[in-house]
Amino acid sequence: MTKYLRPTLREKKRYILFTTKANKDKVKEVLFSFLGTYGYGKAGIIFVKDNVIRVSTKWKDQVITALGLIKDLKIIKISGILNKVFK
C-alpha cells in the first residue's frame, strides 16, 4: 500500500517560456553556476521543451535572475499550466 502526498502538500510549479540564441547546454550551465548544486536541485529545474523550463514556485525568482545573465535571452511568459504557456 503506497501513500500519496495530498495535493496541498505537493510542491507547486511554474513554466517559463523564453527565447534565446544560446543552446540548452549553455542555459543549464548558467543556471547551475548561479544557483549551485543545492539550488539547482531544490528548484527542480526540468527542461520540458527547448525553450520551456519547469521550476518550483519558491525558486522562480532566483531562476529568472539567473536567466537574466544570459545575453539575448528574453522571457516571454510564465504560467502554472503548460498549455497556457504556448497560447
Image (spheres, rainbow, N blue to C red):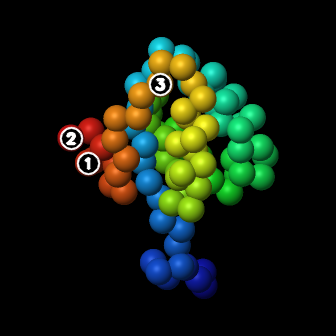
Dot 1: within a 10 Å radius of its alpha carbon, few (fewer than 14), some, or many (20 or more) residues?
few
Confirm or deny contact between disc 1 and disc 2 (CB under 8 A): yes
Tag 2, which secondary structure? loop
Residue 73: which numbered mark, if any? 3
Residue 87: which numbered mark, if any? 2
Mark 1: which amino acid? Lys
Tag 1, which secondary structure? helix
Distance from the alpha carbon under mark 2 to that under mark 3? 20 Å
Residue positioned 59% across, 55% down in the render: 59
Dot 3: within a 10 Å radius of its alpha carbon, few (fewer than 14), some, or many (20 or more) residues?
some
- Residue 8 falls left or right of residue 85: right
Residue positioned 63% across, 22% down in the render: 26
Quadrant holding the N terminus: bottom right
Nearest-to-viewer mark from 3 and 1: 3
Residue 51: which numbered mark, if any? none
Residue 6, percent from left and from top: 49, 82
Picture quadrant of residue 85: top left
Mark 2: which amino acid? Lys
Distance from the alpha carbon under mark 1 to that under mark 2? 5 Å
Residue at the left extreme, as displayed? 87
- Residue 4 falls left or right of residue 85: right
Residue positioned 63% across, 23% down in the render: 25
Closer to the N terminus: mark 3 or mark 1? 3
Residue positioned 53% across, 42% down in the render: 64
Q: Which residue is denoted by mark 1 in the rendering?
A: 84
Nearest-to-viewer mark from 2 and 3: 3
Q: Nearer the viewer, residue 81 or 76?
A: 76
Mark 3: which amino acid? Leu
